[in-house]
Amino acid sequence: MVRVLQVVIAWIRRKFRPCPAECGEGTEFTGSAEIRQPGGRIVVGRDSLIAGQLATETPESRIEIGDNVFIGADTIIDCVTTIRVEADALISYQCLISDSDNHSVRASIRKRDLADWRNGGQHDWSTTASAPVTIGRGAWLGARAIILKGVTIGEGAVVGAGSVVTRDVPPWTIVAGNPARVLRTLGDDER
């Protein structure tokens, strides 16, 4: 009986804990959100389920998630500039979405990164290439997909599991591979 009570209490705490981001009505947030510099912002629409990890890195960072979005467990969304996930998108488990390279390609700059992280994350993001990411309305990212800086995933597009997306994905297409390439266009009966 004690074990049953512990399970019920844990479920209630998960179900009714306050959303760590600005969340719309009906949204469940079982993942984590971290605003690493004051001013960063995470906004989630209505009726979404967020089980992944969201992080903003700078005071200007913005993560915007629309209504009716699913973000699976162990997915990481790491934002330096802007990452936008539009309504009705499905992002599976263990995906990575990043709008930054996170480190400079120049070794003389990159060698300071560890000291930056040990110093409370006081990283100079101006030395790192960054560009906004958009996941379009109704898009679906398969498990372990990686979406890199500057990419727009078009409306209704499907990204195959394990794909690495380095370029924009047209609306209503299926892409897969490393790097991801278009496999086919979705027909009207699949939209």
Image (cartoon, rainbow, N blue to C red):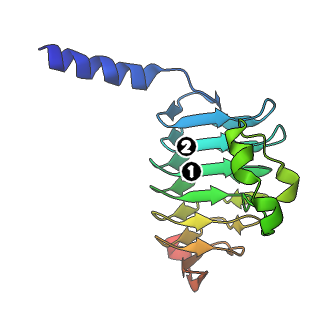
Q: Quadrant of residue 12?
A: top left
Q: Can you identify the residue that label 1 sits on?
A: 76
Q: Residues within 10 Å of mark 2 (few under 14, many from 20)?
A: many
Q: Position of residue 121 (x, y in %)?
A: 72, 40
Residue at figure coordinates x 72%, y 57% from the top left: 102
Q: Quadrant of the N terminus?
A: top left
On residue 53, which mark appears?
Answer: 2
Q: Kindly state the secondary structure of the residue where label 2 is placed.
A: strand
Q: Quadrant of residue 56?
A: top right
Q: Is residue 52 above or below residue 138?
A: above
- Which label's residue is closer to the chain start, 2 or 1? 2
Q: Amino acid at mark 2?
A: Gln
Q: Nearer the viewer, residue 62 or 172?
A: 62
Q: Is residue 17 left or right of residue 128?
A: left
Q: Is residue 131 left or right of residue 153?
A: right
Would residue 15 be visible to someone looking at this image? yes
Would residue 131 be visible to someone looking at this image? no
